[in-house]
Image (cartoon, rainbow, N blue to C red):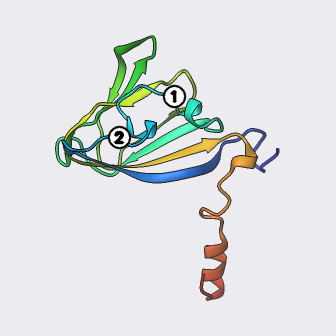
Amino acid sequence: AENGLGEGFPVFTAPTFITRIKFDVEWRPKSMHDVYWMPHVDKNNTGHYDYSGLLYLTTYGEDFEGSMFEFVELSDEETTEQQIVPKRGRLISFTAGNENPHRLNLIEGGTRFVLSFWFSCDMDKRFENFLDGRGHDSFERGGEL
């Protein structure tokens, strides 16, 4: 579908959320999505993800230890292709397919916060009510949301 920006142009999609990973020796995963240290591919978890993004809200070495983001080779879970050091304000974005398997290291102390978001080239999966302009229109008219 045409979206005014060109065929297949990425659109913001749901879900978008802030993740908190807090060091706690008593914590145990409740679902497969809680096992953040296992290599995975975002598009395999959610089929309409075409691009992934992370905005770091905390800094490695100041707010937490461990929990480094790593692109990995899936054929050898021990091989790290590239490691990203989380820093408050750092934004990373990458294609969400099999070309970018990734994981986090286990957190070793403190609390890590990150804003996670995704884009899709499927217009039917666009996030219609996030910054949809209605709030801006209402503000310009002097109305309430």
Q: Tell me where residue 11 appears, x and y as whole percent.
A: 66, 47
Q: Residues within 10 Å of mark 2 (few under 14, many from 20)?
A: few
In the picture, the quarter occupied by the N terminus is: top right
Looking at the image, the residue that sits furthest to the bottom is: 142
- Circle 2 sits on which residue? 29
Residue 41's label in the rendered image is 1
Nearest to viewer (mark 2 / mark 1): 2
Q: Tell me if residue 89 comes above or below residue 43 in the rendering.
A: below
Q: Tell me if residue 62 comes above or below residue 105 in the rendering.
A: below
Q: Describe the element under mark 1 as helix, strand or loop.
A: loop
Tag 1 or tag 2, which sits nearer the N-term? 2
Q: CA distance from mark 2 to mark 1?
A: 19 Å
Residue at position x 64%, y 35% in the image? 47
**Residue type at the position of mark 2:** Pro
Residue at position x 23%, y 41% in the image? 60
Q: Tell me where residue 42 appears, x and y as whole percent.
A: 53, 33
